[in-house]
Amino acid sequence: MSAPLLKVCGLRDAATAASAAPLAIDYIGFMFVATSKRRVTAEDARVMIEAMRAAGGRQKFVGVFVDPTIEELEALLADSPLDVLQLHGAESPAFVRECRSRFPGVAVWKVMGIAGEAEHGDDAVEARLAPYGDLLDALLLDTFDPVVGGGTGRTFRWDVIPAYRRWTQAQGIPLFAAGGLHEGNVGELLAAGIVDGVDVSSGVETDGAKDLDKIRTFVKRVKP
């Protein structure tokens, strides 16, 4: 079995980015959401990308958005060389299709928020995701929040994950999980063998800032 994929999200400064470059991180995420405390500009992201590449990093770079317009994405991609668009809002299959058409070579991931009271059996998952069939390069599950959508630092019910994994396996795409992951619980999730990758943000922070020691420890838990 191949090593799990790892995304570290919410970097905000070039020094931290450069220090993280040698680590076994597959994806670095930048928040372009106006309401996020981790929000960065296209110029900020470009500077961090350049710093990581100069430090020998081989990561791919993910822009996180909530209900952007195509014009907003076009302007941002002109200034910041992203590899992935991560759509965290209510973006429709038609919008995803337009992204794939307008931005060839840029992968598209969709985030599905998991609400504890909702039904997540195979039929419900199929009904929720079928319109996105053949349009996504990855699916990411996160704890649903009605205000900010995700990135809350809270876990969701992991017992709902297998139904989503069956869908992604049928599509031939990876399934990521986020939401409240940290060095103390990520091993349990990975041991269950129900995800292909994990996404961490607040779990590698101290007082709201990325903590390199915590990042290093998390990386070791995911890729020992």
Image: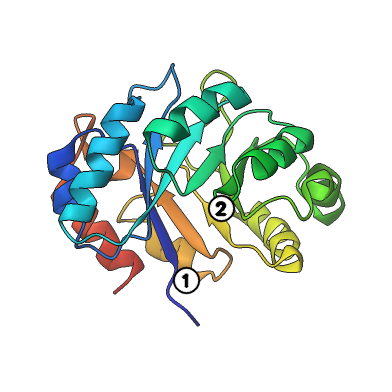
The residue to which callout 1 is attached is 191
Hey, what amino acid is under mark 1? Ala
- Residue nearest the viewer, comparing 1 with 93: 93
Tell me the quarter of the image containing the C terminus. Answer: bottom left
Q: Indicate the quadrant where residue 153 lies.
A: top left
On screen, residue 95 above or below 214: above
Left or right of residue 159: residue 84: left
Number of disc labels:
2
What element does badge 2 sit on?
Answer: loop
Residue 11 visible in the shown view? no
Image point (28%, 58%), residue name: 218
Q: Earlier in the sequence, mark 1 or mark 2?
A: 2
* Residue 202: % across, % down: 32, 38
On screen, residue 84 above or below 195: above
Hey, what amino acid is under mark 2? Gly
The residue to which callout 2 is attached is 105
